Image (tube, helix red, strand yellow):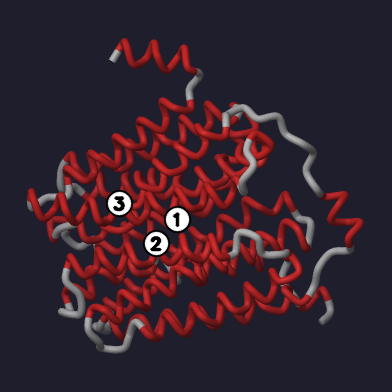
């Protein structure tokens, strides 16, 4: 295919993540309250389905930890096709166990999309500078899927019909992305585009710990935000606030990339986690549209920034360990995402409120921020507190 007839590689990779992650993983957040409304899921069943999705993501990432770049395009195509099937399958009326199984599969497919797109763009195409654009695809997918959910709900569609709408929209995006996957850059160009060696600013154990805490810290907001909102929002559809989550995520990768270059890994990651902690706690301060919107923008505008900062930092620290650093990071992030909804569901069952879960998540992010600081500074700050 002529180059003029296909999309730029970075934008194609962004579309893969928009479908595989934005639709495949996070559309459930917007449809969760609608499925509860329609009697298709309970709050507890939805929490189990969410945790199953994150378990699938962990499983998929581990299975693909040693995948070769020559298979990246094929993995991406399989991820796109499987995600479309999983979206349509969520429309099938079935017991809760079926939804849990589908969400587990969707998690595996999301990991395939991330690994496949990253390997294809960064290794096959050698476009390392396209990483912020690629990760921005997650926010684009969240935004587009959220607006489709809002529109479907406004037209009186049930949650099952909206899942079908998402499957069709995802198909259109996938068809735009696939043509570019048939190409790769010459070997010499890939080597020329490879980044130079980086000196580690954060030790491997600290990166692993902080990344795991980040996975736990953001996921409660990313799972429950629309469910937290009440009718007190008036004419504002709660799902529009969820759309703001994606709107904040899309450009944030570029912002945090710049801050990383300017501030360094430690300070940029600490600032990133502090912003997330503030965003996580805002809904606990009251039932206000401003607080909910602020939470969506702050958490949405920082959670992909964590990936943008931590991945290069991990590559720099990889020489300190004998295992696959990126695979270990993904595993710990996945564990945090699995535990988060379970803890939130348990605390909600005990207290009847999500405030304790939000406080726990914010606390985890604050601990992560402290761990990013140099030891002397962190010790002084802890003594002051």
Q: Which mark is residue 340?
A: 3
* Left or right position of 197 against 202: right
- The label shown at residue 247 is 1
Question: What's the residue at 50%, 19% (across, down)?
Answer: 374
- Earlier residue among tags 2 and 3: 2
- Between discs 1 and 3, the one toward the N terminus: 1
Q: Residue at x 32, y 71 (%)?
A: 150
On the image, the x and y values in percent for residue 79 come to 56, 75
Mark on residue 312?
none
Q: Marks 2 and 3, Cα distance to the nearest angstrom? A: 10 Å
**SS class of the residue under badge 1?**
helix
Tally the numbered discs: 3
User: Which is more foreground, mark 1 or mark 3?
Assistant: 3
Between discs 2 and 1, the one toward the N terminus: 2
Secondary structure type for disc 2: helix
The answer to which image quadrant residue 334 occupies is bottom left
Reading the image, the residue beneath label 2 is: 54
Q: Are marks 2 and 3 in contact (CB under 8 Å)?
A: yes
Specify the farthest residue to the right.
188
Where does the image place residue 307, in percent across and percent down from the top left?
A: 53, 47
Whether residues under marks 1 and 3 lie with C-beta atoms below 8 angstroms apart, the answer is: no
Residue 164: x and y, percent? 39, 85
Horizontal side of 318 relative to 341 (left or right) equals right
Residue 17 at least partly seen? no
Q: Compare residues 292 and 76 and report the one nearer the observer.
A: 76
Does the image show residue 348?
yes
């Amino acid at each position: 295919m002529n180059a003029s007839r296909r999309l730029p590689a970075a934008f194609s990779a962004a579309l893969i993540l928009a479908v595989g992650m934005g639709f495949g993983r996070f559309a459930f957040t917007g449809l969760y309250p609608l499925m509860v409304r329609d009697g298709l899921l309970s709050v507890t069943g939805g929490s189990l389905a969410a945790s199953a999705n994150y378990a699938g993501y962990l499983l998929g990432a581990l299975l693909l930890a040693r995948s070769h770049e020559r298979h990246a395009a094929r993995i991406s195509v399989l991820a796109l096709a499987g995600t479309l099937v999983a979206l349509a399958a969520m429309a099938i009326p079935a017991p809760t166990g079926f939804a849990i199984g589908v969400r587990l599969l969707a998690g595996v497919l999301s990991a395939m999309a991330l690994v496949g797109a990253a390997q294809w763009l960064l290794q096959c195409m050698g476009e390392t500078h396209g990483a912020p654009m690629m990760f921005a695809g997650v926010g684009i997918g969240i935004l587009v899927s959220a607006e489709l959910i809002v529109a479907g709900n406004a037209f009186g569609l049930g949650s099952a019909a909206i899942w079908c709408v998402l499957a069709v929209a995802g198909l259109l995006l996938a068809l735009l992305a696939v043509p570019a996957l048939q190409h790769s850059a010459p070997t010499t160009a890939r080597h020329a585009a490879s980044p130079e060696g980086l000196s580690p600013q954060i030790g491997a154990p600290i990166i692993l710990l902080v990344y795991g805490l980040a996975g736990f810290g953001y996921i409660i907001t990313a799972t429950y935000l629309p469910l937290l909102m009440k009718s007190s929002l008036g004419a504002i559809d709660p799902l529009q606030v969820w759309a703001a989550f994606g709107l904040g995520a899309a450009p944030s990768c570029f912002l945090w990339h710049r801050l990383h270059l300017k501030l360094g890994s430690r300070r940029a990651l600490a600032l990133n986690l502090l912003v997330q902690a503030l965003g996580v706690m805002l809904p606990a301060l009251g039932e206000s549209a401003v607080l909910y919107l602020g939470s969506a923008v702050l958490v949405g505008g920082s959670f992909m920034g964590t990936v943008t900062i931590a991945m290069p930092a991990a590559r720099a620290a990889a020489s300190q360990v004998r295992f696959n650093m990126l695979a270990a990071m993904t595993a710990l992030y996945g564990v945090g995402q699995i535990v988060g909804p379970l803890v939130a569901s348990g605390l909600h069952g005990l207290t009847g409120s999500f405030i304790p879960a939000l406080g726990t998540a914010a606390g985890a992010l604050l601990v992560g921020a402290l761990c990013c600081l140099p030891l002397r500074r962190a010790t002084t700050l802890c003594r002051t507190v």
